[in-house]
Image (cartoon, grey):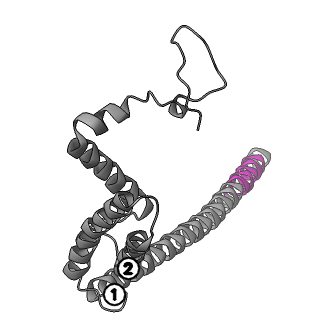
Amino acid sequence: MNKVFFDGEQRHNNFADGDFQNHPGWLSDVFTPQKAESERYQEELVAMKGRCYFEAGYGCSDLQSAKDCLNAEELSQVGDERVASRKRKAAKSLKSNVDSFMSARECVGGSSSIDTAQDNADTTHSANLDLLSDIKDVKTEAADLVAGVLSDTEQQMLDFQMKAEKDKKMMMYVGGGAIAILVLILVLKR
């Protein structure tokens, strides 16, 4: 760490701001150490919750994973004693939250009756969705089949109508021819 003080008018781009002893955070350590430690504790609490994330709606296995992560954080000895003490305090605070969530879910051995019921409900729900999808497929196939039958029936009706019209024309020609022959016979007899 560079222990150098630079004038504000000079530009030294190859040094990071955290490398200097005139860091403004040190003033709070001197004048309000309890407030500074409280702020560091809150920062550690947020950081630890980010590393060992959990929520109230999590299942027992997820809550157990978060608790294991918090146990590891609590047992880690990093830095000065006050840093380790801050980590232990944050881990204990978050572990009490995890424990309360686990007891509310009645977690035993990584699962609970609530988790089992949720899993069963999810399985039933997915089975129902599959069944609905199958019903939609059958309905679509039936509609296609009915449309095919209707089009076949319509085609047969059109063929029948065309044949009936042909038969009608033929009957008109035969009837017209018969009338013409009768008229011719009457004209010749006279």
Mark 1: few/some/many CA within 10 Å (<14, 14-19, 20+): few
- Disc 1 marks a residue whose amino acid type is Thr
Magenta span of residues? 168-184
Any magenta on residue 174?
yes
Residue found 27% across the figure and 42% down from its top: 36
**Measured from the top left, where is residue 154 in percent x and y?**
60, 61
Residue found 65% across the figure and 63% down from its top: 160
Quadrant of image for the N terminus: top right
The quadrant holding residue 56 is bottom left
Element under disc 2: helix
Q: Nearer the viewer, residue 12 or 92?
A: 12
Element under disc 1: helix
Report whether 170 appears left or right of 29. Answer: right
Q: Nearer the viewer, residue 56 or 3?
A: 3
The quadrant holding residue 128 is bottom left
Residue at the right extreme, as displayed: 188
Residue found 29% across the figure and 50% down from its top: 42
Whether residue 111 is situated above or below residue 178 in the rendered picture:
below
- Disc 2 marks a residue whose amino acid type is Gln
Quadrant of image for the C terminus: top right
Whether residue 177 is situated above or below residue 103 in the rendered picture:
above
Which mark identifies residue 64?
2
